[in-house]
Amino acid sequence: MGIAPSIAAFITNCCVALSRTAEDAGRCLTLGKQAVHISETQLYQILGTQGVISLIDDNQVVIPEWLAEARNRLAEQDSIRATIAERRQSGEISDLMFFGGIGFTNVHSVDASAYEGADFVHDLNQPGLSDIVDGPYDMVFDIGTMEHIFNVPNVLQNIFDVVKVGGSVIHVLPANNVVDHGYYQFSPMLFHEYYAANQYKIIQCMFTEESAEGGFGEPIQFYPYQPNLAGRPLKSSEEATYGTAICVQKSEVSTGDAIPQQGSYENQWNNHHEESQDFQVHNDLLLYNLRLYQNLKNLQIHFL
């Protein structure tokens, strides 16, 4: 998927909400080596719009000392490490520059192959990620990766294992109309209910819409997710593609292995159970009245 301008703004907004911006946002891990489809100027505009740095006008920002130092340090790392930056279009920044620009002091990546320069190599279909990476991490980013991995429960458990208590997870993944892009297209419900069942705090959950013509500069519309979108009319396949964007925070009571039941059906089951109980009470009362009537009738016959 890559990090387009709208996704970069969503990520930054989540980090601001979590107070993970500026000089020390902590340590982060990306699932897959990320391509970032924004320029350095766009990064500063996003940081300025989100209040991370001072924005004088649309074309001028005040770059604080910490960001200037991070830019120089990360630019040096980019020149040393084999990164996807070597293949990016002219003017686009690297993953290190983007996450470092937000304020992360350590930016690591994990992938199933080393060909794009990931820091760690691990097949996320398999457990054991925490034994490979240098965790735990303050944030884990899954930007267009999980749909390409067959064993989704293992991916979610791996994420749980490497994010620290108080840390956060961001997923931005396809939801509809991207057939054969990957193995899966994810409804927002999956993450909303999985993380609720595992007692994470849901910071933001969005349903996204993008022109089917695509293009990394194309604006993506973000809509607050409301459970059970089944009745939402979607545009035709030629007009738009859809996605899921969610940010959650892990707590001391969070787990990684609780299996949710789909909420809409669980509500139906519970309502049916209540209706069955009401019917049983009504039925029991009817039988009691019939028996009482029969007993009274027998007494009447006896006295006659």
Image (tube, grey):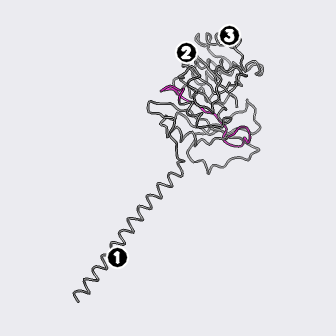
Q: Earlier in the sequence, mark 3 or mark 2?
A: 2
Numbered circle sitting on residue 290: 1
Read off the residue under disc 2: 23
Q: Which amino acid does label 3 sit on?
A: Glu
Mark 2 against mark 1, which lies toward the viewer? 1
Residue at the spot of label 3: 76
| Pointer 1 or 3: first along the chain | 3
Residue sitting farthest toward the bottom: 304
In front of the other: 31 or 1: 31
Q: Which of marks 2 and 1 is nearer the N terminus?
A: 2
Residue drawn at point x = 33 percent, y = 74 percent: 289
Residue 155 lies, in percent from the top left, at 60, 33
Q: How crowded is mark 3: few (under 14 residues within 10 Å), some or many (20 or more)?
A: few
What amino acid is at disc 2?
Glu
Mark 3 and mark 2 residues within 8 Å of each other at the beta carbon: no
Residue span colored magenta: 161-183
At 38% from the left edge and 65% from the top edge, which residue is drawn?
A: 281
Report if residue 163 lies within the magenta region: yes
Secondary structure under the numbered disc 2 in the rendered image: helix
Label 3 secondary element: helix
Q: Residue furthest left?
A: 303
User: Which quadrant of the rendered structure holds the N terminus?
Assistant: top right
Quote the CA–CA distance across marks 1 and 3: 89 Å
| Category of crowding for the residue at label 1, using alpha-carbon neighbours closer than 10 angstroms: few (below 14), some (14–19), many (at least 20) | few
Q: Nearer the viewer, residue 58 or 165?
A: 165
Q: The disc labelled 1 sits on which kind of residue?
A: Leu
What is the distance, in whole Å, between disc 2 and disc 1 at their CAs?
78 Å
Is most of the magenta stretch helix, strand or loop? strand
Indicate whether residue 57 is drawn in magenta: no
